[in-house]
């Protein structure tokens, strides 16, 4: 409801197709489908600037980030260990994507 109040659209990236569904081979149903729709298809097609995700998807999203020009920020719903967070921030910076935890202000 909050997104609607600000005229924002939400787009869901479901991982029901397996643990790598937001990363490599994310939307693969068969080889033909993968050839037509690479893993970044939904991110690019919807021009998502921000993705909120659980921490187990952060690396896969950063892997895809270099192929997603609209993506500017990834926010983790979960707290991130300080050492891991610094690594993720560096990787994101190299790709022009900020990495934050939801708990940050």
Image: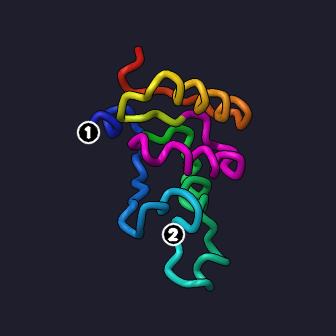
Question: Which image quarter: residue 17?
Answer: bottom left
Mark 1 or mark 2, whichever is nearer to me: 2
Relative to the observer, which residue lies in front, 5 or 88?
88
The structure residue drawn at horizontal position 50% and vertical position 57%, both measured from the top left corner, is 22
Report the quarter where the N terminus lies.
Answer: top left
Indicate which disc, 1 or 2, sits on the residue closer to the N terminus.
Answer: 1
**Side of 53 where 4 appears, left or right:** left
Question: Which image quarter: residue 6?
Answer: top left
On screen, residue 80 above or below 14: above
Residue 43's x, y, as percent?
A: 56, 53
Report the quarter where the C terminus lies.
Answer: top left
- For disc 2, the neighbor class at 10 Å (few under 14, some 14 to 19, many from 20) is many
Residue indicated by mark 2 = 27
Relative to the observer, which residue lies in front, 7 or 45?
45
- For disc 1, the neighbor class at 10 Å (few under 14, some 14 to 19, many from 20) is few
Question: Which image quarter: residue 7?
Answer: top left
Judged from the image, the secondary structure of the residue bearing numbered disc 1 is loop
Judged from the image, the secondary structure of the residue bearing numbered disc 2 is loop
Residue 55's x, y, as percent?
A: 42, 40
Report the disc number at residue 68: none
Q: Distance between the Cα atoms at labels 1 and 2? A: 27 Å
Looking at the rendering, the stretch of residues picked out in magenta corresponds to 53-73
**Side of 47 where 12 appears, left or right:** left
The structure residue drawn at horizontal position 39% and vertical position 42%, both measured from the top left corner, is 54
């Amino acid at each position: 409801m909050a997104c609607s109040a600000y005229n924002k659209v939400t787009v869901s990236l479901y991982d029901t197709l397996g643990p790598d569904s937001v990363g490599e081979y994310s939307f693969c149903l068969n080889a033909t489908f993968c050839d037509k729709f690479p893993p970044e298809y939904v991110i690019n097609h919807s021009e998502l600037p921000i993705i909120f995700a659980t921490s187990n998807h952060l690396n896969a999203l950063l892997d895809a980030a270099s192929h997603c020009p609209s993506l500017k920020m990834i926010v983790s719903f979960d707290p991130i260990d300080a050492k891991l967070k610094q690594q993720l921030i560096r990787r994101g910076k190299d790709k022009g994507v900020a990495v934050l935890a939801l708990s940050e202000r």
